[in-house]
């Protein structure tokens, strides 16, 4: 049986506009444990959660006192009726602990799409936004967070790194991703779906992103292929980045899982069969005679390519980087 591509479930979800995927509590605990220092005396807003189902709400409700949270708010979208919000602000019943008796449920006038005016008003008053946003609206969701200058921790697939809008934010050091990589989510019907290359996106400062990627390979021109139409070496695996190469390197997008802005400079992103962002030379004269073979693998004349044993090799996506320390 043919193996399905890594993001088959995600593409299927996008096509069906099925955004009801719930993050497991164990995955939330693994990631959020690294950010404890950020939550003290802060208002946390989960603006894309069903709070009566959401494990994000459950995590913060259970840890409200431990994390010294100032206020917890959660809302969710209703398709054809007004929604509601849940809040925890204080020990309402004065039993010296935060529990379900302290939850305030308030009916709302609108359906509480994250773009609704009511939802935006709470967004403005909140300190940190933490949620699993709609898979089909990720670009728009992140644009809103940027517009209102919010700190956040959200979950989505790593394919978003190739979106021009998202990649520019990473290049400009406005978003980064760490620590863990969840692989399984629950649907609203309680079925479990597996995904690959899911990541946490955040702009909360974390020490790990300033740890150097350990390099151990020595550059040797015989071991690294060069592109014919761009002055750079190709690197297929992050672990193969040489420690002593000072010029352009084209690395897979998974490099961004280990990206330290003090160690490397991101130049830009290149994607096959796109108009994205960087100019490469047309096919060289000596390869014109192999044009039919080239066109089998390269979609357009300006695709980045290597020529290996009379076969054209065109990578799908690459990040251009330089080592800042050389």
Image: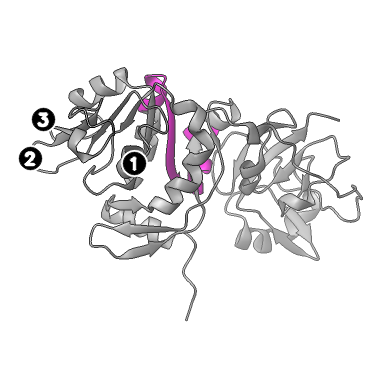
- The label number, if any, that marks residue 62 in the structure image: 1
Tell me whether circle 1 and circle 3 mark residues in contact (CB < 8 Å).
no
Residue drawn at (68%, 58%), measured in percent from left and top?
Answer: 291
- Chain-order first, disc 3 or disc 2: 2
146 shown above or below 250: above
Q: Residues within 10 Å of mark 3 (few under 14, many from 20)?
A: some
Report if residue 194 lies within the magenta region: no
Which region shows up in magenta? Answer: 144-167
Residue drawn at (76%, 41%), measured in percent from left and top?
Answer: 249
Residue drawn at (7%, 40%), measured in percent from left and top?
Answer: 81
- Mark 3: which secondary structure? loop
How far apart marks 1 and 2 lie (CA) works out to 29 Å
Location of residue 102 (image quadrant): top left
Q: Is residue 230 left or right of residue 110?
A: right
- Horizontal and vertical percent position of residue 218: 90, 48
- The label number, if any, that marks residue 81 in the structure image: 2
Q: Is residue 142 left or right of residue 80?
A: right
């Amino acid at each position: 049986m043919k193996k399905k591509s890594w993001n088959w479930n995600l593409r299927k979800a996008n096509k069906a506009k099925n955004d009801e995927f719930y993050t497991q509590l164990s995955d939330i605990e693994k990631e959020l444990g690294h950010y404890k220092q950020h939550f003290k005396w802060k208002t946390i807003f989960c603006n894309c959660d069903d709070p009566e189902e959401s494990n994000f709400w459950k995590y913060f409700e259970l840890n409200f006192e431990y994390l010294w949270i100032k206020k917890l708010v959660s809302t969710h979208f209703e398709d054809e009726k007004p929604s509601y919000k849940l809040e925890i602000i204080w020990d309402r019943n004065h039993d010296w602990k935060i529990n379900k008796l302290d939850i305030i449920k308030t009916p709302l006038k609108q359906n509480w799409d994250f773009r609704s005016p009511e939802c935006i008003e709470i967004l403005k008053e909140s300190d940190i936004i933490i949620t699993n946003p709609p898979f089909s609206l990720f670009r728009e969701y992140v644009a809103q967070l940027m517009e209102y200058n919010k700190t956040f921790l959200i979950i989505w697939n790593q394919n978003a790194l190739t979106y021009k809008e998202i990649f520019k934010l990473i290049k400009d050091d406005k978003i980064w991703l760490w620590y863990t990589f969840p692989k399984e989510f629950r649907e609203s019907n309680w079925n479990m779906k597996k995904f690959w290359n899911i990541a946490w996106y955040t702009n909360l400062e974390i020490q790990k992103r300033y740890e150097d990627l350990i390099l151990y390979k020595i550059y040797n021109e015989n071991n690294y292929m060069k592109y014919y139409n761009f002055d750079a070496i190709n690197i297929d695996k992050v672990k193969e980045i040489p420690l002593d190469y000072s010029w352009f390197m084209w690395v897979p997008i998974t490099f961004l899982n280990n990206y330290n802005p003090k160690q490397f400079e991101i130049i830009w992103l290149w994607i096959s069969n796109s108009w994205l962002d960087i100019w490469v030379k047309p096919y060289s004269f000596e390869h014109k005679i192999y044009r039919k073979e080239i066109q089998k693998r390269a979609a357009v004349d300006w695709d980045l390519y290597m020529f290996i044993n009379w076969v054209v090799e065109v990578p799908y996506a690459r990040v251009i980087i330089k080592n800042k320390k050389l």
